[in-house]
Image (tube, rainbow, N blue to C red):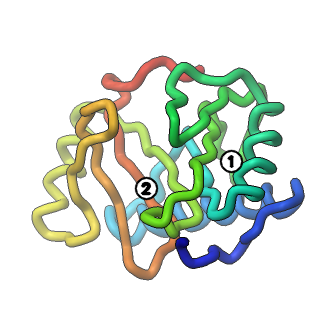
Amino acid sequence: MAEAHRFSPIQERGTLYEALDYIADSAGALSKHLVGVKLPFDTLTLFAHYNPEHEFIDSVVRNLGNVSTLSHESTLYVKPRNLIVRDHRIKLLGVRVPDPDRPQVGYVDFPVSDSGYKQYKTLQLNNRGITEIYSASGTPIIELRDNDSDVLGYIVKESSREKTS
């Protein structure tokens, strides 16, 4: 099993919201460190590390909005009715099942224009923390990863995303 993150196990709403704030703050620091600017984000996903923790987070997240069609067997996504985390309006909130390959606290999606995506993609040539990968649906995305951060970030083309609002 993955190493416990600083919030494990999440078993109460206060700790859950603390983890959301932490992911938001860490994602801002990650994008600032790797691409030079704090990018806005609209998708935030928590990684559960234990089954009881996942069950609790899943039950809270389901009550925050309607389940999204983007949900799949490893991640539940909801469209929150009105969720602001550190000045970011969250259009999709997710919780991932426990996965030993995902020791991080969570991730965010940074939506950018097509030209912005091309600009950030060129940065991968000079930066080991920036890599273009493919999402589970086969869409190219740019992963932001740093060994000193327990949060991931993904730069995604706004044009390739399904409507989430």
Q: Amino acid at mark 1?
A: Asp
Frontmost of labels 1 and 2 is 2
Quadrant of the snapshot with the N terminus: bottom right
Kindly identify the residue that appears in the image at 32 percent across and 55 percent down.
143
**Residues under labels 1 and 2: Cα distance?**
17 Å
Please tell me which residue lies in front, 7 or 109: 7
Tell me the quarter of the picture where residue 20 sits.
bottom right
Horizontal arrangement in the rendering, residue 111 relative to residue 56 (left or right): left
Mark 1 Cα within 10 Å, few/some/many (few <14, many 20+)? few
What residue is pinned by disc 1?
A: 87
* Residue 100 visible from this viewpoint: yes
| Whether residue 127 is situated above or below residue 46 in the rendered picture | below
Dot 2: what SS? strand
Using the image, tell me which numbered label, if any, was put on residue 153.
Answer: 2
Classify mark 1: helix, strand or loop: loop
In front here: 69 or 147?
69
Residue drawn at the location 66% of the way across and 24% of the way down: 67
The answer to whether 27 is drawn above or below residue 146 in the figure is above
Residue at image coords 78%, 57%: 16
Q: Tell me which amino acid carries mark 2.
A: Gly
Earlier residue among tags 1 and 2: 1
